[in-house]
Amino acid sequence: MNMEIVGIWVGAILTLGIFSFLYKDNPVYKVCEAIFIGVSAGYYAIVYYFDSIYKKFWQGAVTADHPDWWLFGGAILGVLFLTRLFPKIGWVARWPLAFIVGATAGLYMVTYFVTNAMNQVASTIMDVIARGDAGDINWVQTFGTLVILVGVTTGLMYFFFSKEHKGAFGGAAKVGIWFLMVTFGASFGYTVMSRMSLLIGRMDFLLGDWLGLIN
Amino acid sequence: MLNTSATVILTLMGVSLIYILYLTITGRPVERRVVFLYVGFSVWLPLLMKITPPLPITTDVQKLYDYIIKLPPGSKVLCAFDFDPPSAAELQPMAVAFVKYAFKHDLKLIIMGLWPQGPQQAQMAIAAALEDPTVASHPHEEGVDWVNLGFQSGNEFVILSMGGEFKRMFPRDKRLIPYDSIPLMKNVVNFSNVDFIMNFGAGYPGTKEWVQIGVDRFKSKLGAGNTAVQATEVYPYLRSGQLVGLLGGMSGAAEFEKVLGEKGKASTFLLAQMFGHATVMAFVIIGNVAFFVLRRKKKDPAGNN
C-alpha cells in the first residue's frame, strides 16, 4: 500500500477529530490531541538529536580528524541540565541556565538597543514634507509622516504620568490612546487573518490532498 | 458544477444572515456552533470557486520584488526557513514562489532553518518548484544550485556565530556532506559572501532576530515573509530601511505570486480568506446591533422613546 495515501488518510482523520471539538469536547478530540503532542515531541527529539547531538557534536568533536574542543563545553553544559532529574544535585542545573541567561542578556543589551531603539528613533525623525524624485511634494507620504508625528508625540504624552492628564495635555493623551487602540485593533485583525489561514490550510488539505476536489 | 453550486450556497448563506440578525434582535441568538458552521462554509466553498479576486500590489511587496530582480544570475541567497507546518498555509506559497523565481533566474539558494521543521518545509518548497515546467526545463543540482544546511539549535546565537563562519554552525549539510565538499559553499565564509538573505518567519526565532543580528550587526540585506500575526511587529523595520521588503500574511503571499507572475495557492486561498473575514465581520455587526437593540429594550420595555 502506498504510504503517502495512508499518511493522508491518517492526517484527514486526525484533522476531523480535532475539528470535532467545535461541536463539544469529546474522547476522539482528546485522542487526536494526545497523538499530536506525542508525535510533535517525538519529532522534535529526533531532529534535535540528529542535527545537534549527532551531526554537530558527535561528528564535529568525537569522530572528526580535527576535533572542535569547544563543542565539549556545550555538551557538558547540556548534560548538567539533566541533573535536575536527581533532587540531591538538581541545583547544578542552574549553572547552564545561568550561562544561557547571561549570554542572552549580554547579546540583547546591544542588539535590542541598536535595532529597536536607536534605528527606530532615527527613522521617526524625518522631514514632515515628503518630496518625490522631481522635488514635488508627495502628499500621500506627507500625510503618513504627519500621522507618525502625531501618533508618536501623543502616544508618548499618554505614558507621561508626572503631569495630570487634564486640559490640552489630557486631550493630547486621549488622542494617544486612540492611536494605541487603532494599533491594537490592527494587530488583532492580523491575528484573526492568521487564524483564518490555519483553517484554510486544513480545508485545502481535506479538499485537495484527501478528497481531490481541488488542484 | 462545483463552482456554480459553491456560488449559490454562498449567496444563500449571505441572505440567511439577515434571518440570523432578525433572530438575534428578537432575543433568540443562534448558538456558537452555527457561527462555526458559517465560518467553515465561508472558507470551504470559495476554495471550489474559480474566481481570482482583484489584488493591488502594495509597496512592501513591490520593494522586495524590485530588489530581487536586480540580483544578477549566480547571486548567492541565504534562505532561512523559520516556520513549521501550522504556518505553512501562509508561508509555504510565498516560499514556493520565491524558490521558483530563484531557480528560473539562476539564484543560488543556501537554505537553513532555526526551527526544527523549517528545512523540511524547504525540501517541500524545492520539490514543488522543480515540478514547474520552466524550472524543470533546466537541470538543477543539489549542492550546486541549492543546498539545504538543515536545522541548528541555538536561535539568535546561530546567526551571531554565522557572522564569523557559516561552517561553524553547519559543518555538514542535510545529506551529511561536509561543508568544504559542497561546490556551492566554496568561497562562502560568512554573511559578507552572501548577496541577499530571505527569511520566512512565523515567530521566535525569526525576522526580528535576523534584523537585529544579520542586518544591524553584519550589514546584510534582508527581505522577509511573515505570518500575519507577526507582520505587525515587523512593519517598523520596513520603514526604517532595516528590511528591503515584506510579504505580510496571505495577502502578501498572493501579491508576491501576482508580481512574479506565478499562479500559486495563495491566490486561491485569498478568496477563502476574504469570505471568511466577511462572515466574521457580519457576525460582529449582528452581535453589536443585537446588543444595542436589546439594551434599548431593557431600558424602555414599553417601547416608548
Image (spheres, coloured by chain):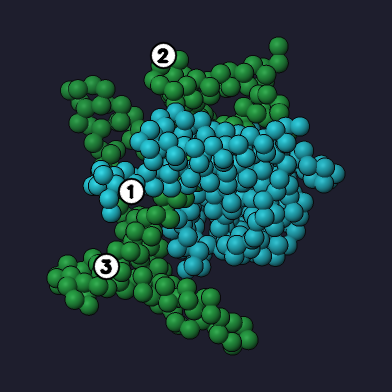
Chain colours: A green, B cyan
Q: Which residue is mark 3?
A: A174
The residue mark sitting in front, 3 or 2, is: 3
Q: Is residue A153 visible?
A: yes
**Chain ID for label 2?**
A
Instruction: Please name the amino acid that badge 3 sits on.
Output: Lys
Q: Is residue A170 above or below residue A188?
A: below
Please tell me which residue is depicted at 39% across the width and 20% down the height of the picture.
Answer: A25
State the image quarter where residue B291 is shown. top left
**In the image, what residue type sits under mark 2?**
Pro
Residues beneath discs 1 and 3 located on the same chain: no
Q: Depth check: give the residue in front, A186 or A5.
A: A186
- Where is residue B193? Give x, y as percent: 61, 58
Query: Depth check: A139 or B218 in front?
Result: A139
- Name the element at disc 2: helix
Q: CA distance from mark 2 to mark 1?
A: 39 Å
For the N terminus of chain A, the quadrant is: top right
- To which quarter of the image does residue B66 belong? bottom right
- Classify the position of the C terminus of chain A by image quarter: top right
In the displayed image of the protein, which residue is found farthest to the bottom? A135
Farthest-out residue, top: A1
Report whether mark 2 lies on the same chain as mark 1: no
In the image, which disc is placed on residue B292?
1
The Cα atoms of the two marked residues, 3 and 2, are separated by: 50 Å
SS of the residue at dot 3? helix
Q: Nearer the viewer, mark 2 or mark 1?
A: 1
* Mark number displayed over residue A33: none
The numbered mark at residue A27 is 2
CA neighbours of label 3 inside 10 A, class few (<14), some (14 to 19), many (20+) = some
For disc 1, the chain is B
